[in-house]
Amino acid sequence: MEKDLKIADRLLEEKKYDDCIHFLGNLHNKTNPEVCWRQARVMFMQLHGGTTKPTKHEARAQLTTALDRIHAGLVTDGHNADCLTVGGSPISVHPTNFYCSQWNGIIVDHLSKLEGGNERTKTAFKTHDLWQVSITRTNTPPSRAILFYGLICLIFETDWSIDQRLNTIGNPVQSAYHNTYSVTMELELKEADKLVQEDKYSECVIFLGSLQDKNNPEVCWRQARVMFLQRGCVQISRTYTTLFPVDKASAKPGKQEVRAQLTTAMERIKVGLDADGNNANCLTWNGILIDRLSKLEGVNERIKNAFKIHDLWQKALEIDPKNYLANNCLGIWCYEVSDLPDIKRSLAKTFFTKPPTSSYEEASALTYLNRCEELAPKKLVGNLLTLAKCHYRLKNKDQARVFCQAVMEFKATGYDVIETQAEAKHLLKKL
């Protein structure tokens, strides 16, 4: 079942709505709540993602079918006894399945919207209750429900005519939109981080893409991060709670596939930096993506961008000195510049009057690498390996051995970790 659900999520991410509907409709367990809410979701997305706007009749028919699927999921969920009624349809307000409850409220709200302001006002408290149930569920990501709750509060707060209609039904909703928005955004970001930690990259891409404030820098760098992680570009220990988990894929993706994904990620970073040029995480990921894309083009391109990426990471650290990823990036940059063979150093002279220079010592590479370890102990396998290499170059063999061993004991899977551990194993033979 889990594999089938991932296929459905991937089809939705690729906007293959008809294929997704057909695929979910052919699954054996059609009343499983996880299948039902996904069916409702794709029907909803199909309405909003088409090239032509559907008529009111078409939208009503599609959303009614979607609501039927939600009800099927709620029946299976076993908590449909306490119901509200919207247009003659029973609505469970006590489901245990977070997403069924969430999409229940979304679809009810959109159906009432088709009937006009009066109908939406009448159902306001009902949809509010559905989302509030989602918000109060334990061990579930509540933020999207809070988002819709916040949006409806915004409508009530800014639309005078709706406010007047609310007064006719008594006890109107009272809201402080700015506080709601702030809490909403914080929880949305936490949910995105949680999806990444659980390796649910496709789900995270869809989730971030559905947020209202897509140009928020905090959303943009997270979109870039998950696209980067989807290609297995970063590997992190699973023994620690971290924002950068392991890609389980063992196969290394093709160059064209990586280039396309990272280019899209770069576009999101540019949007984030346009909104806030001093966002430390946007600056850090901008440097990472430029560096990775340069690597795909070869040594010449990477050398050309050497100063640019250094300055991006340096600026990120000036803004946020505790940014361990920026410390890691600068540490590796300093090591690689220090370790440039003569032929590459000569090549660098063709691009710069003064080629980039650095050293292994405390003044540069080790300073950043050690700082990264202080902020995030044994989280980044690349940081551990580069520390081992630095100590090897400085002839600190005991220290080099310690960090090589840490790489070998790194609890993670994925092609990047395999390659890093192979390099550490080779280095150990020299010690």
Image (cartoon, grey):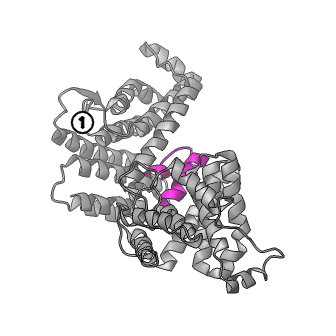
Give the prevailing secondary structure in the magenta stretch.
helix
Quadrant of the rendered image containing residue 118: top left
- Of 131 and 303, which appears nearest the observer? 303
Residue 282 location (% of width, % of height): 62, 53
Q: Which quarter of the rendered picture does the N terminus lie within?
A: bottom left
Residue at point 49%, 19% (across, down): 165
Residue at point 41%, 60% (across, down): 13
Residue at point 66%, 75% (across, down): 302
Check disc 1 and report the residue beneath it: 96
Q: Is residue 158 above or below residue 98?
A: above
- Report the magenta residues as a range: 207-227
* Mark 1 closeness class: few <14, some 14–19, many ≥20 residues within 10 Å: some
Q: Is residue 278 left or right of residue 191?
A: right
Q: Is residue 330 left or right of residue 37?
A: right
Quadrant of the rendered image containing residue 304: bottom right
- Of 381 and 64, which appears nearest the observer? 381
Residue type beneath disc 1? Thr
Does 52 lie within the magenta span? Answer: no
Q: Is residue 325 visible?
A: no
Residue 422 location (% of width, % of height): 40, 76
Q: Is residue 40 above or below residue 431?
A: above
